[in-house]
C-alpha cells in the first residue's frame, strides 16, 4: 500500500468535520463476513485498508441496530445495540478501533423521529390503555367520524397512504413513514432524556459524530384540533417555523440540549442534520454551533447536470454556511436516490420512479455520458469548500440496478404506493469486490438483493488493476484533496462561456468544469487531475479538471 496511507490514529483537530470527505456505508450491502447474504460489521472491519486507500476522512454508518428491516434498518428496535445479524457491540468496538487506527473517523446514524414497532416502548404502549404514560411516549389519538373509524387528521405517510394506523382498542398512532415506524412524542421529557443517554452511549464508546435522521420532523404541533396538512412533502413548508409537522421552531430546543451533551466530549462530537427546510436561512438554524453544527444540503443531489443550476446551488450554499458558521455539505448520491452515474445518463427532468418501473428501459440510459458527467460532478464537488459525502459504490462508478425483479424488492415504498413506485433498492445492491468469485466477493451465498452481471468489470479488483478506472480516479482525487485543502472560500473566475464553471481556492487550486460541447482551454499551471481524457490539451464536454497555478 502507498506509504502516504500509513497513518495510525487520528489528527487531534476538533474541526476535522469542516472539510471532511465522508463515505457512507449501508452496512447490509457492503461486505458479508459470515455467509448469510447480509453485510455486517466484521465485513466492514475487514475492508479498513480499502477505506484507507480510498483516502476518505470519515465513515458515516447507516443504521446497524437491531431491526426487522421494515425500512432498511431505519426502523430501530434498540438504539444501544447491534443487530445480531450484523455483529455484536464488541464487533462495533473492533470496527471503530480499526477505522481510528486507519485515521478514519466514524459517524453513526441516529433515528430519533421514530422507533420501530418492535421497540420495547412501543410494545408497552400497545399493551397499555389509552391515556397511559406508555402511550404518551408516542403519538396516539382517538379517530374522527361518528365511530372514530377515520384517522385523527389528514396527515400522510412519506411512503404513501395515511400517516395513522389504528390499533385493536380503536386508537390511532402516528407514523410519518411506514406503520412499523411509530413517531416518538418529543414533547415527552422521558423521550428527550432517553436520547441524551443514547448520544452518551455511543460517544462514550468513541464515535466521532452523528447523522441525525429526519431532524426536521421531530417537533410537532399536537394541539387539538390537529391542523390539516394534506401533503407528506417536507419541502412544502412555510418558512416561519409554524408548519404542524416540519421544520418547526421548537425542534431547535431539542438540538440545543443535544449540543450540550455532544460538547461534553473532547473533541466535541460532530453532528449533521438530515433537515429538509424550505430556505437556506431555515436550514442554517440546524447548522448553528449551538445546534447540531452541520446540515445536509441535498441541492446537488436533486439537480440536473446544468451549469446554471450547479453555479446557483454552490453560491447559495456557501452563503448559507456563512449564515450559520458551519461549513457547507455536498452530496451527489445516497441510499435514498438513484445513483448519480445513472441520473446524468437520463434526459433532464425524467421521472426516476417511472424509469425504474420500466426496468430501466424507458427512456434508455446513456451510461457513457452518465459516467463521464458523474466523474466530472464528483471532481467539481470535491473541490468545493466544506465536506463532501460520498455513497458506497459511487467510487466504482456503479449505476442504478434498475431492473430488480419485483419479487425481491424490500423498500416499503413499493407496497405502500400500491406498487406504483419501486423505491430505493436499486442503489442498495451489495458491492462487487471481485469479478470472478461467486456473488462478486460480497458473500459466499446469495446476497439479500441480487447483483447484475455487469457488476463484474466494475468490481474493486477489476478497477484496482486499471489506472484509468473510476476507483483510481476517486483515490487520486481524494488524496490530492487532502493535500490541496485550503481556506473555506472560493473565487469565481469569469470570462468563460456560461456552460463552464471555473473557480479558484486559496493557494491557486483551480477547478474547471465543462458542461458544454465546445472544448475549453485550461489555465496555465500544473493539471493535477482530470475526470476524463483531455483532447489536444483542452477540456472536452462533461469533463472537469484541477489545475494548480500561481494564482
Ligand atoms: C432516511 C431514509 C429513511 C427515512 C425514515 C430518511 O431520511 O435517509 O432512508 O427511510 O429517513 O427513517
Image: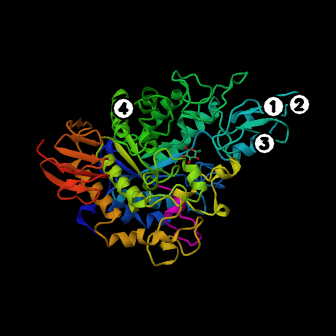
Q: Is residue 333 left or right of residue 546?
A: right
Question: Residue 265 in magenta?
Answer: no
Mark earlier in primary sequence (2, 3): 3
Quadrant observed for ligand 1 in the rendered image: top right
Magenta stretch?
25-41
| Ligand 1 within 8 angstroms of badge 2 C-beta | no
Identify residue for label 3: 126
Is label 1 or label 3 in front? Answer: 1
Is label 2 or label 3 in front? Answer: 2
**Quadrant where the N terminus lies?**
bottom left
Mark earlier in primary sequence (2, 4): 2
Give whichever of 75, 469 is nearer the camera: 469
- Main SS category, magenta section: loop
Alpha carbon distance from label 1 to label 2: 8 Å
Give whichever of 403, 206 is nearer the camera: 403
Alpha carbon distance from label 3 to label 4: 46 Å
| Ligand 1 within 8 angstroms of badge 4 C-beta | no
User: Do we see residue 149 in this rendering?
Assistant: yes
Identify residue for label 2: 147
Alpha carbon distance from label 2 to label 3: 20 Å
Identify residue for label 4: 316
Alpha carbon distance from label 2 to label 4: 51 Å
Identify residue for label 1: 143
| Secondary structure category for the residue under label 4 | helix
Label 2: how many Cα within 10 Å (few below 14, some 14–19, many 20+): few
Q: Residue furthest front?
A: 518
Amino acid at each position: 500500500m502507498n506509504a502516504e496511507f500509513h497513518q495510525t490514529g487520528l489528527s487531534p483537530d476538533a474541526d476535522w468535520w469542516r472539510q471532511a470527505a465522508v463515505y457512507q456505508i449501508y452496512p447490509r450491502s457492503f461486505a458479508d463476513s459470515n455467509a448469510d447474504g447480509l453485510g455486517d460489521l466484521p465485513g466492514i472491519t475487514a475492508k479498513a485498508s480499502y477505506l484507507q486507500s480510498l483516502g476518505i476522512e470519515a465513515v458515516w454508518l447507516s443504521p446497524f441496530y437491531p431491526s426487522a428491516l421494515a425500512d432498511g434498518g431505519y426502523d430501530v428496535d434498540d438504539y444501544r445495540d447491534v443487530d445480531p445479524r450484523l455483529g455484536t457491540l464488541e464487533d462495533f468496538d473492533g470496527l471503530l478501533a480499526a477505522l481510528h487506527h486507519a485515521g478514519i473517523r466514524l459517524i453513526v446514524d441516529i433515528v430519533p423521529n421514530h422507533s420501530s414497532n418492535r421497540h420495547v416502548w412501543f410494545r408497552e404502549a400497545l399493551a397499555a390503555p389509552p391515556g397511559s404514560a406508555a402511550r404518551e411516549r408516542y403519538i396516539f389519538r382517538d379517530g374522527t367520524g361518528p365511530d372514530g373509524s377515520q384517522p385523527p387528521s389528514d396527515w400522510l405517510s412519506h411512503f404513501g397512504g395515511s400517516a395513522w394506523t389504528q390499533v385493536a382498542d380503536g386508537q390511532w398512532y402516528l407514523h410519518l413513514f411506514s406503520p412499523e415506524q411509530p413517531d416518538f412524542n418529543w414533547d415527552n421529557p422521558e423521550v428527550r432524556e432517553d436520547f441524551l443517554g443514547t448520544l452518551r452511549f455511543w460517544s462514550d464508546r468513541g464515535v466521532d459524530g452523528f447523522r441525525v435522521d429526519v431532524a426536521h420532523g421531530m417537533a410537532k404541533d399536537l394541539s387539538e384540533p390537529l391542523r390539516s396538512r394534506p401533503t407528506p412533502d417536507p419541502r412544502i413548508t412555510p418558512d416561519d417555523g409554524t408548519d404542524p409537522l416540519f421544520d418547526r421552531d421548537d425542534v431547535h430546543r431539542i438540538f440545543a440540549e443535544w449540543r450540550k451533551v455532544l460538547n461534553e466530549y473532547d473533541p466535541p462530537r460532530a453532528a449533521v442534520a438530515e433537515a429538509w427546510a424550505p430556505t437556506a436561512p431555515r436550514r442554517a438554524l440546524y447548522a448553528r454551533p449551538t445546534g447540531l453544527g452541520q446540515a445536509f444540503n441535498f441541492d446537488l443531489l436533486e439537480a440536473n447536470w446544468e451549469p446554471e443550476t450547479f453555479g446557483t446551488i454552490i453560491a447559495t450554499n456557501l452563503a448559507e454556511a456563512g449564515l450559520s458558521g458551519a461549513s457547507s455539505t455536498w452530496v451527489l448520491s445516497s441510499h435514498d436516490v438513484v445513483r448519480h452515474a445513472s441520473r446524468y445518463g437520463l434526459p433532464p427532468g425524467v421521472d426516476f420512479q417511472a424509469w425504474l418501473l420500466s426496468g430501466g428501459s424507458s427512456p434508455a440510459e446513456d451510461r457513457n455520458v452518465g459516467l463521464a458527467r458523474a466523474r466530472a460532478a464528483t471532481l467539481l464537488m470535491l473541490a468545493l469548500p466544506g465536506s463532501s459525502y460520498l455513497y458506497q459504490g459511487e467510487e466504482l462508478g456503479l449505476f442504478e440496478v434498475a431492473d430488480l425483479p419485483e419479487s425481491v424488492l424490500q423498500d416499503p415504498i413499493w407496497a405502500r404506493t400500491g406498487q406504483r413506485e419501486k423505491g430505493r433498492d436499486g442503489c442498495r445492491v451489495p458491492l462487487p469486490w471481485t469479478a470472478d468469485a461467486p456473488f462478486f466477493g460480497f458473500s459466499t451465498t446469495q446476497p439479500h438483493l441480487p447483483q447484475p452481471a455487469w457488476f463484474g468489470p466494475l468490481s474493486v479488483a477489476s478497477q484496482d488493476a486499471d489506472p484509468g478506472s473510476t476507483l483510481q480516479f476517486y483515490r487520486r482525487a481524494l488524496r490530492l484533496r487532502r493535500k490541496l485543502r485550503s481556506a473555506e472560500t472560493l473565487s469565481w473566475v469569469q470570462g468563460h462561456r456560461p456552460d463552464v464553471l471555473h473557480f479558484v481556492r486559496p493557494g491557486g487550486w483551480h477547478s474547471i468544469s465543462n458542461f458544454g460541447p465546445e472544448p475549453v482551454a485550461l489555465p496555465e499551471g500544473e493539471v493535477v487531475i482530470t475526470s476524463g481524457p483531455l483532447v489536444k490539451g483542452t477540456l472536452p464536454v462533461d469533463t472537469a479538471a484541477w489545475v494548480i497555478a500561481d494564482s
